[in-house]
């Protein structure tokens, strides 16, 4: 253990980043050092406490449904880890709704990462048939956010 110096400032920064983004864990590796910061599952559930009645039931169907949706030709996946927002600001109407026609390049949601709001464009013309991301919920890289057919 004597060769391993703990960088408490880095650990504090990573812990703050978990808090800001709502992520469950962060892991970084540099040469032969690896640091993993994780929040207990209880804390992650508390972050999404608004729809408390549906929160426990949501992960099971989503996990089962995501596997086949990954290969769906209309799957729009998250290009990054962050927090998905379905509207431009709190109280504003959603960018899109199920059943709405969209054009290629039209913003359908934003993903906030590192305090930067990244517009997520529709990859093609079509109709939104499913919205899988929840507003203000954490999303992972490659996670299916919506289906546009």
Image (tube, rainbow, N blue to C red):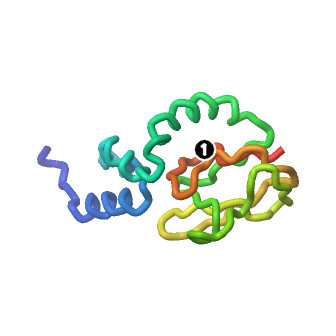
Task: Using the rendered image of the protein, determine whether residue 143 is visible from the camera's viewpoint.
Answer: yes
Q: Position of residue 129 (x, y in %)?
A: 78, 44
Q: Position of residue 24 (x, y in %)?
A: 39, 47
**Quarter of the figure with the C terminus:** top right
Mark 1: few, some, or many residues within 10 Å (few <14, many ≥20)?
many
Q: Position of residue 21 (x, y in %)?
A: 44, 59
Q: Is residue 54 above or below residue 96?
A: above
**Quarter of the figure with the N terminus:** top left
Q: Quadrant of residue 86?
A: bottom right
Q: Position of residue 146 (x, y in %)?
A: 70, 47
Q: Quadrant of residue 108?
A: bottom right
Question: For this view, does 105 lie left or right of residue 68?
Answer: right
Question: For this view, does 66 lie left or right of residue 99?
Answer: left
SS state under label 1 = loop
- Residue labelled with disc 1: 143
Task: Using the rendered image of the protein, determine whether residue 34 is visible from the camera's viewpoint.
Answer: no
Tally the numbered discs. Answer: 1
Q: Is residue 108 above or below residue 91?
A: above
- Image point (32%, 48%), residue name: 43
Task: Please identify the residue farthest to the front as the structure is shown.
Answer: 53
- Image point (80%, 63%), residue name: 105
Question: For this view, does 109 lie left or right of residue 149?
Answer: left
- Image point (70%, 35%), residue name: 69
Q: Nearer the viewer, residue 26 or 5?
A: 26
Q: Is residue 87 above or below residue 38?
A: below
Q: Is residue 16 above or below residue 55?
A: below
């Amino acid at each position: 253990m004597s060769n391993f110096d703990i960088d408490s400032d880095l650990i504090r920064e990573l812990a703050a980043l978990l808090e800001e983004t709502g992520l469950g864990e962060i892991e970084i590796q540099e040469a032969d050092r690896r640091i993993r910061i994780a929040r207990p599952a209880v804390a992650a559930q508390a972050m999404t406490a608004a729809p408390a009645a549906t929160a426990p039931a949501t992960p099971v169907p989503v996990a089962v449904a995501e596997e086949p949706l990954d290969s769906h030709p209309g799957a729009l996946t998250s290009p990054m880890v962050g927090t998905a927002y379905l509207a431009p600001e709190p109280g504003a109407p959603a960018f899109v709704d199920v059943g709405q026609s969209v054009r290629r390049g039209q913003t359908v949601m934003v993903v906030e990462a590192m305090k930067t709001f990244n517009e997520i464009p529709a990859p093609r013309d079509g109709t939104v048939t499913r919205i899988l991301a929840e507003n203000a919920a954490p999303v992972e890289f490659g996670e299916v956010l919506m289906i546009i057919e």
